Amino acid sequence: MELLKLENVYKIYSLGEENIAAINGISLLINKGDFVALIGPSGSGKSTAMNLIGCLDIASKGNMYLNGLNIQNLPESNLAQIRGKKIGFIFQTFNLIPSLDALENVALPMTFQNVPRPIRIKRAKELLKQVGLADRIYHLPNQLSGGQKQRVAIARSLINDPDIILADEPTGNLDTKTGDEIMNILVDLNKKGKTIILVTHNHELTKLANKIITLKDGKAMEAQ
Amino acid sequence: MFTDYFLLSLKSIRHRKLRSWLTVIGIVIGVAAIISLMTLSRSLENTIEDQFETFGANRILISAKGFHGPGSLSQGLTTEDAETIKKISGFEYVISGIFRSAEVRYKNEIGFTIIGGIPSEMYEEFYGDTGIEIEGGRNIREDEKYVAIIGSRVATDMFEKDVHVGDKIEIAQQEFRVVGILEEIGNAQDDNQISISLDAAREIFDEEESIDLIIAQVKSTSDIPQLQEKIEKELERKRGDTNFQVLTASQILEQINQILGIMQIVLVGIAAISLIVGAIGIMNSMYTSVLERTKEIGIMKAIGAQNKDILTIFLIESGLIGLVGGIIGTILGTSLALAVGPFSKSAGFTLNITIEPLVIILGLLFAFCVGIIAGVLPAWQASRLKPIDALRYE
C-alpha cells in the first residue's frame, strides 16, 4: 500500500546568481510497512531529502503525496499537524526538551494535538515501559544516558501513532552495543507494522532494511 | 490546553531560575515604585482634605495680600475692616486674630513658635466649631489675659521637659500660665502653636490696630460664595484698595490639590520610567530565551507545534514574569507606603495611609500587560522560525 510518493522533486537553493540543486529530481515510492534505508555520503542531499520527507522543509518543485494527499503546497500550520500526527522523529542528538522530564517529553507531541492530560500521561507511561524505561520516567534528560535518551526519543516518536518513523542517524552518538539495542527496537517496531525510514551513512545498518535508497549528487538510486 | 502551555512556560522559567528572577526584579522595582508613590500621594491628598474639614468648611478667611497662613508677616488689615465685615449679615461670628512668631521660654529653655491671639471671649466658638478638643485643662475664659493654650507638640516636643497645665511659660518676656493643652491635630504647624488672648497679643507684639487674619464663620455653607463676594465688595468700598484677599477653605484645598496633582504626575512619571526599564529587561530576557531555545523551538515544531502554540508558550512566559513581578512589587510597594505612615508621624505630619484596591488591581494588570507587550516581539520572532533552521541551530 502506497504511503509516501515523491514525484520528480527538486530542492533548489539560490546562492546569489547561482542555483544549487540539493535534490535534483527525485522520484520514489515508500509502501506501508517498509524499512527504508536512505544512505549516501555527505553532500549527497541526504539531509535535505529527509527534511522534505519529514515536512520540515518545502520542495521547490515536484509533488509529494502522503497517504494520497498532496502535501506540496500546504501552509506551515497544516504541515505542523502532519508532522505531529503522521511522522515520528528520532534524531542523532536525541533532541529532548531539557526542562521536561522523560514522561513530559514523551507526552509533549500529544499536548500539541490537544489530547487531555490523563490520556497523554497514560500513553506516555505505556511507551516508556515498552522501551524499558519504566523506572526513569521522572528523570530529566541530563540525568539519562545516551541510550536512555534515545529510548525516550523513540517513545516520543510513537506517541501519536504515526504512519512513518523518520530516524536520522539514531545510533550516531551511541556506542555499538547501545546502538544495536536501539536498532533492535526499530526492527521490532517494523515487525509490528510501522514504516521506518532510516537515514544513515553506516552501511552495516542497511542490512536491516528491505529497501535501500542511495543518494548521490541529489539523485536517488533504489535497490530492493 | 492553556493549562498545559502554562505548565510548559513555568517549567522553562524555573529551568533558568537566576535570569528569570533578575528579570522579575526589574518589574518589581517599577511596580513597587508606582504603587508606593501612588498610594502615598493619594493618602497625602486624603489627609490634607481631612485637615481642611477640621478647620471648618464654613469659614471665610480674610487676610492682607501675600498672607498665606499663620506665620508670614503681613500688614494691612485693621480692626476697622473687621467691623466692616461684622456689619454684613449672614455670619454667626467674626473673629479677628493676630498670628506672629515669638520667642518662648520654659524653665530657661528657649523655643520659637507661632503665637495666635484671638479675643478671649471667642475661644469657645473657635475650638468648638473646628472640633479640636482640649485634651488637658480647659479653654481660655472671658476676661482672662495672661493665660495660654498650647499645641500638643509644644507640650511634649518643644522643650526638654514636658509642659503641663498650670506651668508658667514666658512669651516675649511676658509670663503666661498654661491653662489647656490641645489634642494632636496632625500637622506640625498647628501642633506647635500657642494660643493666647488678643489683648495679650496686642500688648506683647505692640500692635494697636492691625489684624493678621479675620475668620468669618458663616451660618450656612450654601451662602459662602455670595458672602465671599459681599466681603470683597464692602472691603474694597471702605478701604479704597484691593490689598487683601478673601479665601474659603475649599479654594485653598483646590489650590493644594492642584499642586498635589502636578506632584503626582511627576512621581508616577518617574516610576513609569523604571517600569519601562523593567519592560526592556523582560524583552531582553525573552530575546535571549528565544535565541537560547531556538533548537527547542525547532524540536517542538518537528513534533507538531504550530506557530500559534510557540507564540502562546512564549507570551505566557513573559506575562508570567510580569505578573510575578507585579505581585511582589505590589506587596513591596504597599508595605513601603505603610511604613511611611509611622515615619511621617514622628516628623510631625500624621499621614493616614489608605491602601486603595483600585491602585493594586491597576498595578497588577499593568505589570501583566507590560510582560505581555515586552514578550510580543520575541515571541512572534520565535514562532516564525522555520522548523528546519531552528532544528539546525546550535
Image (cartoon, helix red, strand yellow):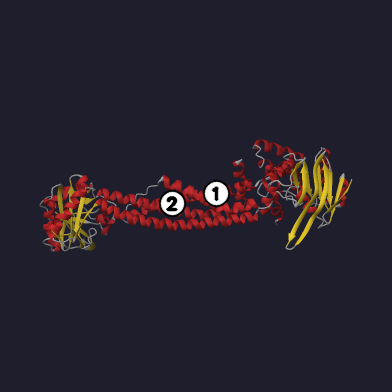
The crowding category of the residue bearing disc 2, from other C-alpha atoms within 10 Å (few below 14, some 14 to 19, many at least 20), is many
What amino acid does circle 2 point to?
A: Ile
The crowding category of the residue bearing disc 1, from other C-alpha atoms within 10 Å (few below 14, some 14 to 19, many at least 20), is many
Q: Position of residue A147 (x, y in %)?
A: 77, 48
Q: Quick one: A23 or B133, which is closer to the camera?
A: A23
Q: Residue at x 64, y 56 (%)?
A: B291
Q: Position of residue B218 (x, y in %)?
A: 18, 47
The subunit carrying tag 1 is B
Position of residue A73 in the picture relative to residue B129 (left or right) = right
User: In the structure shown, which secondary structural element does the residue marked by tag 2 occupy?
Assistant: helix
Q: Position of residue A141 (x, y in %)?
A: 70, 49
Name the front one of labels 2 and 1: 1
User: Residue beneath label 2, please?
Assistant: B35
Whether residue B178 is visible to the viewer of this picture, yes or no, is no
The subunit carrying tag 2 is B
User: Residue beneath label 1, please?
Assistant: B319
In the depicted structure, whether residue B93 falls above or below residue B111:
above
Q: Position of residue B152 (x, y in %)?
A: 25, 53
Q: CA distance from mark 2 to mark 1?
A: 19 Å
What amino acid does circle 1 point to?
A: Gly
